[in-house]
Amino acid sequence: MAFSTTLLTWGFIEYKTAYSAAGEHDRMLDSIKWPLDYFIKAHVSKNELYGQVGDGHADHAQWGRPEEMTIARPAFKIDQASPGSDLAGETAAAMAAGSIAFRETNSQYADTLLRHAKELYEFAAQYRRAYTDSINQASDFYRSSHYQDELAWAAAWLYRATDDPNYLQKAEQHFAEWTPFGNPAWGFSWDEKTAGVQMLMYQLTGSNVYQTLIQNSLQQWLPGGSVQYTPKGLAWRIQWGANRYSANTAFLALLAADKGLNSEAYTTFGRNQIHYMLGDAGRSYVVGFGENPPQRPHHRSSSCPNLPASCDWSDYNNPGPNPQILNGALVGGPDQNDNYQDKRDDFIMNEVACDYNAGFQSAVAALKAREECEKK
């Protein structure tokens, strides 16, 4: 949730003209304010952040409307005794980015976000541990691989929000301390911020070091790199959420192109990946949009019939389309041969998630901004 908010907000900060041109500026601010408000409420004291509500196993055993859930909803937190540097760091990054997004329209709210971001970063940096070692409930669903990338990510965003050189120094220190930052990134996702850190640090410093690193990471995704392509052109990293990894990297590539790096190749890559998802290869992977879009996303509430009818596992097993159209949701995507089944019970291909959509939407905004610029 925090990563989705950071990535969505990054796209807004960079491509505000696209949102304005689409008439979505104010709605976008409303969209990111919802999770940011939630993070404020979850950060109950300086070194105390609630990171999960609900039991993942119990939740997965339910099928129905979320507002009709009656099972227990336990809450889990990180604190000094049970820290989570990645969770605190990513939430700090989201709030720092949020403070930038709201600075012009709501400076008081921006100040509140920045205060929370600073406290959460200090908590993350002082008490170091992966959050899934503290919130064991999350381990079966969102196990963290490392936290060093989130420390650099948070410090970099705080520098961008404050212009305080101390945060840049801390970001560079975190970067220097962690060897994988110097290697091409595997991907860009909720668990892996390396490529995002490389790109953001290049933006902030203009350093040739970071330029080389982000270019090396993006090179792996271009044709001929280490990432394989489907026959119809999707850069396919892994089966689970294939569209997500491609969309996230497309955003980074389009942003890098707009900052003058390998512009033609990165623009072509970013546009081709997003257009694949929108239907250029023969079918759309965005619910409610384009040619032959998914009709049975693995999504509880949209699978439910209109009230007052009940909703349960019989609706999960219903072979028909979801009664409610989840407009705009990006599904997980095809296998490495472009094979795709529009089946609700195939959650690998048809799951939808906030982090699937955040990079995708930010990449669409990048393409829209470019289109508006060309009009002028």
Image (spheres, rainbow, N blue to C red):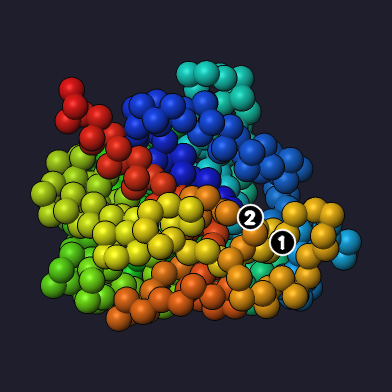
- In the image: residue 359, left or right of residue 301: left
Which quarter of the figure is the C terminus placed in? Answer: top left
> Between residues 301 and 92, which one lies in front from this camera angle?
301
Q: Vertical placement of 220 versus 194: above or below?
A: below
User: Is residue 151 something that shows in the picture?
Assistant: no
Q: Amino acid at mark 2?
A: Gln
- Mark 1 crowd level (few <14, some 14–19, many ≥20, 10 Å Cα): many
| Furthest-front residue in this view | 320
The total number of labels drawn is 2
| Label 1 sits on residue | 304
Identified at 43% across, 52% down, the residue is: 289
- In the image: residue 188, left or right of residue 73: left
| Label 2 sits on residue | 324
Q: Distance of mark 2 from mark 1, alpha carbons?
A: 7 Å
- Mark 2 crowd level (few <14, some 14–19, many ≥20, 10 Å Cα): some
User: Is residue 334 something that shows in the picture?
Assistant: yes
> Residue 35 placed where, x, y %?
63, 43
Identified at 26% across, 75% down, the residue is: 230
Q: Earlier in the sequence, mark 2 or mark 1?
A: 1
Identified at 25% across, 29% down, the residue is: 372
Identified at 69% across, 58% down, the residue is: 301
**Contact, mark 2 vs mark 1 (Cβ under 8 Å):** yes
- In the image: residue 313, left or right of residue 225: right
> Residue 369 placed where, x, y %?
28, 34
> Between residues 10 and 127, which one lies in front from this camera angle?
10
- In the image: residue 112, left or right of residue 197: right
Q: Amino acid at mark 1?
A: Cys
> Between residues 89 and 302, which one lies in front from this camera angle?
302
> Residue 189 placed where, x, y %?
43, 61
Regarding mark 1 in the picture, which secondary structure is present there? loop
> Residue 317 placed where, x, y %?
68, 77
